[in-house]
């Protein structure tokens, strides 16, 4: 076993079909691909499982230099171009997202290779492994020109239009002539008959899919100066949405470390209601109402069994998250162990989640979408639950595994939950409006409590939790909630204190600095940097916010993808990749910068401030 | 065949089956909501869909009750245990054959092959309808046992 290969996390590219996703390294190797779904075991797991966990190498067989990596504009097709002596080789990777109504496998990977200048030799090595045991496929056979690989109910059919025959674990060299591109197709079936997709058809389907993505991207509404960034982030969020259920996947990977060589390695292949709510806001501000409503539909369906409690995380089909386990003989990324599956945060009480959800419901209401009776009943139940439990300590947004405490951010979000419930109730009128006074009273109690216990007069800032002088970057939402006037000294003091004390250099900030019970210090937390942009914009320091946003976007590299964290010294991305929360936060920040109208700075009775996400309403041109 | 019993007790048994499913759903054991699933094929609003779906479900229940009545007549015997046995077979067929067909005919239900263009909002049921909660197959079997037992008790074999 070897764990020596280490591609920087941020150098990977993402491809997917909204049911699963793969990571492609700059050398063309697929080092991560879970099948048949995001949360299934990896078939190619080298990124955290070492060579024994499988990979799918496809790249130049001769000396070459990486010339360019990019996504084709407005699509999910990743293009890698290498320069070779006297020529050029381009690999275009994609999966076919839209298969409904056609006899295609549920998942089809298409790798298209083309050369320029002269014929270029390409080496291909397919090494699928399956499950935690990293087992070689149980059955491997050739069938009418296709390599068929089977392991229990899962099967892959690999076809090429080249003359050579592929075999498992064999390095096969093809010659790609400028006049004759090479296509490699991998069709996947899970407990269904295999569908053999001829390379010519696969190529046509991939091109058709690209047109679909372009149409979808054209419907995105955003300011021209941020368009490329916003489109890439929205496309990434869409690729991380599990279409059969509408679940937002936090990230397609497990155990990419938040500290190289450390143990802060978690499984993010699940859906967090918090992410769904932030996603609703992100899609709404970009004019993608349909996607926003799909997230809410998933959230309601998934949380049904636990209601009125909101689970911290759920599986893609809304079941409770699986118990956390460690894969002891997996080497981990850069020897960062353990590699984990499942997530231990599933059973935590996290008060902030309700605030996100009710704010998302309010956003939809404000955007003109009537909440149906079932949705309103769910929101009502959440609001009642918050009114009854806001005074209890919780695990907080960071899912700390030590003792629950009174997190200031959680209290702020409890306030937000009750505030948005009041607004929705008043908007609905009739019997619903009669619920408002009770929630209003609870909201005011939360406000009084957090103002009395969460603010440190010596620091001039809101703290991380009651009784501590430590800070928490999650409190950066303060200026845009409305609990305090955005122009107040308390708000400005909190933003400045967080920036100063949690700053990690440049636009980067840590989410907190206090001991969280885990060894070592993690990297700077990228969503917090985008929240800082939003906060600065919220308190009127827009030039500063804009400058910081531009610096942050530049950190994403040519592909525009972001992990959860970044090492402030090396600039290397850390944590699971790419991360939906970071991209949703980026979109929030971009929307805040694009907002034309100034934010309200006063909270008075029912003259309420704008919700968390402020953005221009969009024309509904969102059909792919 | 006991047509009179079929007309009355088909409705009774289906109502009891629906009530069992709703009670278990309210207890938080399953997200399976048959009136919603059936009704949302015809109308989008969940509250209206439940009403429509309940009516549709009564119709299906009546249809299946005719098969039960025919079964009792063919075997020339009836009883709660025989009805429950029919109910068990009915539940297994529903879980393994009928429910998996739903994504193919339901305009608002996604399938496991759904892509970003999908406008379906209902989740596919998955194998044995497990996507609606781990207890769903057990609840479905239990409800059909009750349905069959009611028909077995109430219907005459001939």
Image (cartoon, rainbow, N blue to C red):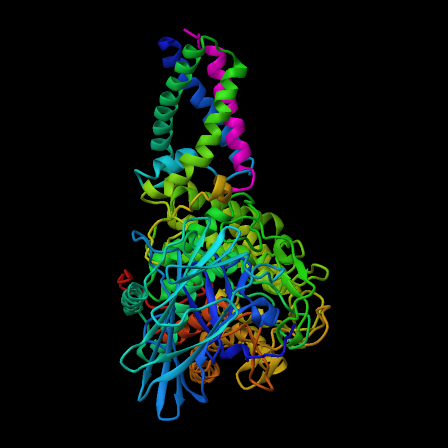
Whether residue A604 is visible, yes or no, is no
Residue displayed at 46% across by 11% down = B154
Location of residue A620 with respect to B100 vertically, above or below: below
Boundaries of the magenta span: B133-158
Question: Which of the 4 image quadrants contains residue A17?
Answer: bottom left
The one of A616 and B68 positioned closer to us in this rendering: B68
Image quarter for residue A124? bottom left
Horizontal arrangement in the rendering, residue A476 relative to residue B113 (left or right): right
Between residue A582 and residue A330, name the one nearer to us: A330
Query: Residue A232: x and y, percent?
Result: 39, 73
Vertical relation: B128 (above or below) A79: above
Residue positioned 47% across, 59% down in the render: A141
Task: State which quarter of the image contains the N terminus of chain A.
Answer: bottom right
Pick the front one: A118 or A590: A118
Q: Please report the residue visible at 47 percent of the width from the left and 80 percent of the height from the top.
A: A26
Count of numbered marks:
0
Q: x%, y% of residue A557?
A: 46, 82
């Amino acid at each position: 076993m070897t764990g020596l290969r280490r591609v920087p996390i941020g150098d990977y590219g993402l491809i997917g079909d909204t049911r699963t996703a793969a990571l492609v390294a700059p050398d063309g190797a697929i080092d991560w691909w879970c099948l048949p779904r995001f949360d299934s075991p990896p078939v190619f797991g080298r990124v955290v499982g070492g060579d024994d966990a499988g990979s799918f190498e496809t790249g130049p067989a001769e000396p070459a230099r990486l010339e360019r990596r990019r996504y084709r504009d407005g699509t999910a097709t990743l293009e890698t171009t290498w320069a070779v002596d006297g020529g050029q080789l381009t690999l275009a990777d994609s999966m076919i997202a839209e298969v409904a109504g056609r006899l295609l496998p549920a998942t089809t990977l298409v790798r298209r290779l083309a050369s320029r200048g002269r014929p270029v030799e390409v080496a291909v090595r397919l090494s699928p492994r399956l499950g935690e045991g990293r087992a070689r496929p149980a059955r491997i056979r050739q069938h009418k020109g296709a390599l068929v690989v089977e392991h229990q109910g899962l099967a892959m059919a690999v076809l090429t239009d080249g003359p050579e025959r592929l075999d498992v674990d064999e390095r096969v060299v093809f010659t790609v002539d400028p006049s004759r591109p090479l296509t490699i197709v991998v069709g996947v079936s899970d407990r269904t008959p295999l569908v053999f997709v001829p390379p010519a058809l696969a190529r046509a389907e991939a091109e058709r899919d690209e047109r679909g993505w372009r149409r979808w991207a054209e419907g995105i509404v955003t300011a021209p100066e941020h368009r490329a960034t916003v489109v890439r982030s929205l496309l990434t969020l869409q690729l991380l949405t599990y279409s059969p259920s509408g679940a937002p996947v936090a990230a397609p990977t497990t155990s990419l470390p938040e500290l190289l060589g450390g143990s802060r390695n978690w499984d993010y292949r699940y859906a967090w209601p918090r992410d769904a709510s932030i996603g609703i806001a992100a899609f709404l501000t970009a004019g993608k109402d349909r996607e926003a409503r799909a997230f809410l539909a998933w959230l309601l369906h998934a949380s049904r069994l636990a209601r009125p409690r909101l689970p911290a995380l759920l599986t893609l089909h809304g079941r409770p998250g699986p118990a956390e386990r460690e894969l002891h003989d997996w080497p981990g990324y850069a020897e960062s162990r353990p590699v984990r599956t499942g997530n231990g945060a599933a059973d935590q009480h996290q008060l902030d989640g309700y605030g996100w959800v009710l704010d998302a419901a309010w956003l939809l209401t404000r955007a003109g979408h009537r909440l149906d009776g079932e949705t309103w009943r769910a929101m009502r139940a959440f609001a009642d639950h918050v009114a009854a439990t806001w005074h209890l300590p919780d695990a907080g947004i960071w899912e700390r595994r030590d003792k629950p405490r009174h997190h200031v951010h959680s209290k702020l979000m409890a306030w937000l939950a009750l505030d948005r419930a009041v607004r929705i109730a008043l908007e609905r009128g009739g019997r619903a409006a009669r619920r408002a006074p009770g929630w209003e009273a609870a909201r005011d109690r939360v406000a009084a409590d957090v103002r009395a216990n969460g603010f440190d007069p010596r620091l001039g800032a809101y703290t991380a939790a009651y009784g501590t002088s430590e800070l928490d970057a999650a409190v950066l939402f303060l200026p845009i909630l409305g609990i305090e006037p955005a122009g107040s000294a308390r708000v400005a003091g909190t933003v400045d204190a967080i920036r100063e004390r949690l700053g990690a250099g440049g636009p980067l900030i840590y989410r907190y600095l206090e001991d969280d019970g885990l060894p070592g210090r993690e990297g700077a937390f990228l969503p917090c940097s985008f929240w800082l942009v939003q906060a600065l914009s919220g308190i009127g320091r827009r030039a500063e916010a804009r400058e910081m946003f531009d610096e942050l976007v530049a950190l994403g590299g040519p592909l525009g993808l972001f992990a959860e964290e970044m090492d402030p010294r090396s600039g290397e991305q850390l944590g699971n990749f790419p991360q939906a929360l970071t991209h949703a936060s980026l979109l929030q920040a971009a929307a805040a910068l694009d907002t034309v109208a100034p934010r309200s700075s006063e909270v008075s009775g029912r003259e309420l401030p704008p919700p968390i996400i402020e953005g221009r309403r969009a024309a509904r041109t969102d059909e792919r | 065949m006991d047509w009179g019993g079929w007309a009355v007790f088909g409705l009774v048994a289906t109502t009891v089956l629906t009530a069992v499913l709703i009670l278990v759903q309210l207890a938080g054991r399953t997200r399976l909501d048959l009136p919603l699933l059936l009704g949302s094929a015809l109308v989008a609003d969940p509250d209206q869909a439940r009403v429509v779906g309940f009516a549709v479900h009564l119709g299906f229940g009546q249809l299946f009750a005719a098969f039960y009545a025919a079964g009792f007549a063919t075997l020339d015997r009836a009883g709660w245990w025989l009805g429950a046995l029919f109910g068990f077979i009915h539940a297994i067929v529903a879980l393994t054959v009928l429910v998996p067909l739903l994504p193919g005919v339901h305009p608002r239900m996604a399938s496991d092959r759904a892509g970003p263009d999908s406008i379906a909002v209902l989740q596919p049921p998955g194998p044995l309808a497990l996507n609606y909660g781990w207890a769903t197959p057990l609840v479905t079997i239990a409800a059909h046992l009750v349905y069959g037992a009611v028909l077995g008790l109430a219907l005459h074999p001939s």
